[in-house]
Amino acid sequence: MTQIIVLPHVELCPDGTVIEAEAGKSICDVLLEHGVEIEHACEKSCACTTCHVIVREGFGSLPEAEETEEDLLDKAWGLEPQSRLSCQAVVGETPLVIEIPRYTINMAREGKH
């Protein structure tokens, strides 16, 4: 099992959490399985940016993003060099520290800020 530390997020995970994740699963699936209700408007098909996360530690251990993910990330709110779409980033053996951005493009459009 691989440890994922989720940093506090005002709405989704106010106190942060530590998750023991099975290698080979997407970060999005792991978060959802452990009660962190990250948005995933396209149902994890790599067609939106609502599951955007920033990998604060362990970024280099993730498989490289494919071109489709890279193109979508350019549209993500709060994009950083360590940004990934959690539906596409697969957990390996290296522990991760994940930050969920405060907003998604969906939330900004809906006025939830």
Image (tube, helix red, strand yellow):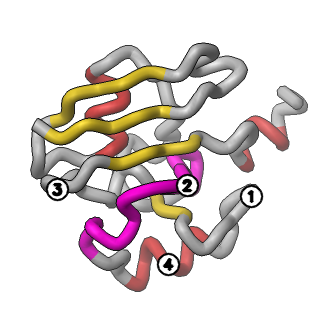
Q: Earlier in the sequence, mark 1 or mark 2?
A: 2
Separation (CA) of disc 1 from disc 2? 9 Å
Q: Residues within 10 Å of mark 2 (few under 14, many from 20)?
A: many
The magenta-colored residue range is 49-63
Q: Which structural element holds mark 3?
A: loop
Instruction: Reply yes or no: does residue 26 show up in magenta.
Output: no
Q: Which residue is mark 4?
A: 70
Could you say where residue 100 lies in the image, as x and y percent from the top left?
58, 40
Residue 31 vertical position relative to residue 101 in the rendered view, above or below: above
Q: Amino acid at mark 2?
A: Ile
| Cα separation between marks 2 and 4 | 14 Å
Rounded to the nearest angstrom, the CA distance separating label 4 from label 1 is 14 Å
Task: Please identify the quarter of the rendering in which residue 112 is found.
Answer: top right
Find residue 48 and report its horizontal and vertical position in percent. 54, 56
Are the residues flagged by discs 2 and 3 in contact, CB closer than 8 Å?
no
For badge 3, the amino acid type reads Gly
> Quick one: label 4 or label 1, which is nearer the N terminus?
4
Kindly identify the residue that appears in the image at 31 percent across and 19 percent down. 34
Question: Residue 48 versus residue 11: which sits nearer the camera?
Answer: 11
Where residue 81 appears, x then y in whole percent?
60, 74
Judging by the rendered image, the residue that carries numbered circle 1 is: 78
Mark 2 or 4, which is nearer the eye? 2
First in sequence: mark 2 or mark 3?
2
Image quarter where the N terminus lies is: top left
Q: Going by the picture, which residue comes out furthest to the bottom? A: 67
State the image coordinates of residue 18 (x, y, percent, origin top left). Answer: 36, 25
| Residue on which disc 3 sits | 92
